[in-house]
Image: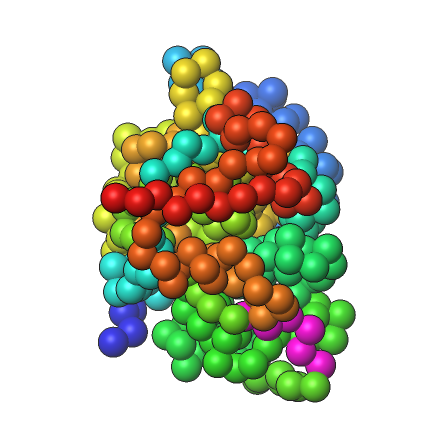
Amino acid sequence: MRAALCLLCAGAWQLVSSGRAAAALKLSSLEKFQFKSWMVQHQKEYSVKEYHHRQQIFAQNWKKINAHNKGNHTFKMALNQFSDMSFAEIKRKYLWSEPQNCSATKSNYFRGTGPYPTSVDWRKKGKFVSAVKNQGACGSCWTFSTTGALESAVAIASGKMLSLAEQQLVDCAQGFNNHGCEGGLPSQAFEYILYNKGIMGEDTYPYKGKDGRCRFQPQKAIAFVKDVVNITLNDEEAMVEAVALYNPVSFAFEVTEDFMSYKSGIYSSASCHKTPDKVNHAVLAVGYGVNNGVPYWIVKNSWGTKWGNDGYFLIERGKNMCGLAACASYPIPQEGESLHHRHITSHVPYLWFSTQSTPVDREYSPEEPFHMCILLQ
């Protein structure tokens, strides 16, 4: 059953315009100057009435950012493209309005025992991570997480970096319990691509950022899914193994208000939930590491390169932060046989080791020769 999204109704402009005008007088000259500078930077234009409304929201957000940055936190906040919006608006336009319960996803991943590299960053291994994209005002983050994981999988398997069509998933994947701009799950999108027999490129199916009619053309499909790997619910260590040995991993988590202004550092939250029914945003883990004793994930977002750290963020690892381990998955591309397939179809743990050194203190490269050892129980 599709849940209705409850929205707070704004009052009539005529009834509140006088109150806004009075409130606007309380803004400092610095706040007014900062807002005008921000408008120029982000090329914003408003009507006279909306100008005062947005100015007030901006000033409130700026105060929250400054107060946060003065405190003792593991991450910093900054102004960005969302700074003139309330969190209620952001949730409606950029996050899922259709609830997605990750607990319905069936696991088929069998984790080994390690050891794993202490840090991994697929961006540094070669051309295995596609560029950061921008979903716009559509809750289609799940499509960008999906294409990002498959783009990486194809690049790792074949050396070819593709740009796949998020819009195809928005328009065509509803039969797999996805809902276009209202939300969806990467695991369900991978299943769609598998049974649909492919996904087109962004050049032949360009992104529109709104729901539309399905225009898939099978003869133009350029990437295919052989199998889908769903990591066990809340098994964050299995996510580590998957990212270390195989592929960037799609995951979903719950975004709360402070995340929208993230700029740098390791994000953590005491207000978000860790249950699979609360997740509202999907992203792509492209690596992990440790900083000053705090383990973290390296995550690719879909809000453009002006958000966060060039479109990326770090989030605390090992605590199922905001439910990030609730529904992690990645695809196995159709091209060629790979260790992914042997891993999920064998029920025995293993260790891999390089012919040159062990993985404990260094990253594994896909080009590097290695062996798989079956561990006898």
Majority SS type along the magenta span: strand
Where does residue 29 sit, x and y in percent of width and height?
Answer: 60, 21
Q: Nearer the viewer, residue 154 or 77?
A: 154
Residue 44 image position (x, y, % from top left)? 67, 46
| Image quadrant containing the N terminus | bottom left
Q: Is residue 283 above or below residue 356?
A: below
Question: Magenta stretch: residue 224 in it?
Answer: yes
Q: Quadrant of the C terminus?
A: top left
Placement of 139 over or under 348, stated as above or below:
below
Q: Is residue 295 left or right of residue 363?
A: left
Q: Is residue 222 left or right of residue 168?
A: right
Which of the pair 271/4 is nearer the observer?
271
Q: Nearer the viewer, residue 265 or 89?
A: 265
**Residue drawn at the location 29% of the way across and 64% of the way down:** 106
Please tell me whether residue 221 belongs to the stretch shown in magenta. yes
Is 313 displayed left or right of 40 in the figure? left
Q: Residue at x 67, y 55 (%)?
A: 155
Quadrant position of residue 18: top left
Asked whether residue 299 appears in the rendered view, the answer is: no
Instruction: Indicate the position of residue 121 as horizontal and vertical percent values.
Output: 59, 35
Residue drawn at x 66%, y 86% as measured from the top left: 217
Q: Which residues are magenta?
A: 220-225
| Relative to 153, residue 352 above or below | above
How far from the left and from the top, in percent, is residue 198? 59, 77
Residue farthest along the front direction in this orientation: 376
The type of colouring in the image is rainbow
- Residue 370 can be seen, yes or no: yes
